């Protein structure tokens, strides 16, 4: 009773056994990182900074001929996971939403949604990291698309659209030449615009040919794109964006989309 009065969150009675004791202690300290509430803002800042540094490497240094290493991505992902875990997706989106470059902002949005989705699904830490790094890098091929197309304030012409659609292949080739990137990252970079009904690009893959990590990335990618502000249109509301994706029917993994609903609607 004295312990409870002093603010204890649990008490353990005799006789002790090691396994039970350890379990109770773990339950009382759910975060093994030694997290402190005052670190919340710092964790968010560090995560956004780390993600931004990857963006600079991808979109400024890579096209200028400076290599992008797999280790550059790995260095950022732990900080990104920590940032979203310790703050919230909402705070992440608010912070990265201020970014003036559409392409950076998009990648940071996709990463935020991907990490929140992975955490919501209860994925293991290493799977969360795998998804975070794939999301961060999925549009790396846009580094090779002229900014006049990427940042065009009006709708793209057919030719410009065709060039834009080259980005999965351009990104894939760049990472392949660079080497050292795991196959699932290459898969996401090359296939995140494939649709389950075969109507996507660049390879027109169907259902079973599209891996789980690609399906997850495709859902968060489309959702992020719809709720982002763009120069040529206002962003869609969460409800509208989600409904539009439901209307895409057999193009998307609809079961996975339903699992994404709580994240999309902010119940994370
Ligand atoms: Fe893309
Ligand atoms: Fe994208």
Image (spheres, grey):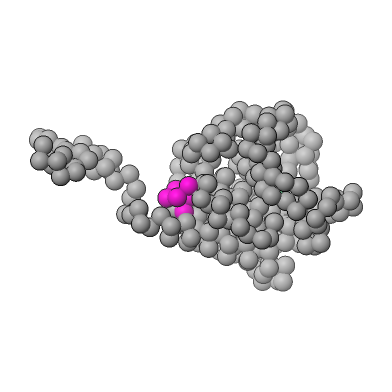
Q: Quadrant of residue 104?
A: bottom right
Q: Is residue 210 above or below residue 47?
A: above
Q: Position of residue 57 (x, y in %)?
A: 63, 66
Q: Is residue 233 above or below residue 215?
A: below
Q: Nearer the viewer, residue 6 or 255?
A: 6
Q: Is residue 180 above or below residue 110?
A: below
Q: Name the residue at 77% across, 58% down.
A: 151
* SS assignment for the magenta stretch, majority: helix
122 magenta-colored: no
Q: Name the residue at 58% across, 56% down.
A: 96
Q: Position of residue 218 (x, y in %)?
A: 66, 41
Where does the magenta region start and end? 83-88
Residue 57 visible in rendering:
yes
- Image quarter where the N terminus lies is top left
Q: Is residue 214 left or right of residue 9?
A: right
Q: Nearer the viewer, residue 200 or 234?
A: 234
């Amino acid at each position: 009773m004295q312990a409870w009065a002093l603010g204890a969150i649990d008490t353990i009675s005799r006789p002790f056994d090691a396994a039970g004791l350890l379990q109770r202690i773990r339950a009382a300290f759910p975060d093994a990182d030694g997290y402190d509430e005052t670190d919340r803002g710092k964790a968010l800042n560090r995560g956004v900074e780390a993600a931004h540094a990857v963006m600079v490497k991808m979109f400024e240094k890579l096209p200028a001929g400076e290599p992008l290493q797999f280790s550059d991505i790995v260095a950022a992902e732990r900080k990104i996971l920590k940032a979203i875990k310790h703050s919230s997706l909402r705070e992440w989106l608010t912070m990265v939403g201020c970014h003036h470059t559409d392409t950076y902002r998009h990648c940071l949005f996709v990463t935020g949604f991907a990490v929140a989705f992975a955490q919501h699904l209860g994925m293991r830490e290493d799977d969360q990291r795998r998804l975070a790094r794939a999301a961060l890098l999925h549009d790396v091929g846009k580094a090779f698309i002229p900014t006049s197309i990427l940042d065009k304030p009006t709708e793209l012409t057919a030719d410009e659209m065709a060039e834009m659609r080259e980005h999965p292949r351009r990104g894939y080739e760049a990472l392949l030449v660079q080497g050292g990137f795991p196959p699932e990252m290459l898969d996401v970079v090359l296939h995140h615009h494939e649709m389950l009904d075969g109507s996507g690009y660049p390879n027109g893959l169907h259902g079973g040919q599209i891996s789980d990590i690609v399906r997850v990335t495709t859902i968060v990618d489309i959702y992020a794109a719809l709720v982002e502000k763009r120069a040529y249109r206002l962003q869609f509301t969460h409800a509208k964006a989600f409904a539009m994706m439901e209307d895409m029917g057999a193009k998307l993994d609809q079961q996975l989309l339903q699992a994404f609903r709580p994240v999309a609607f902010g119940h994370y």
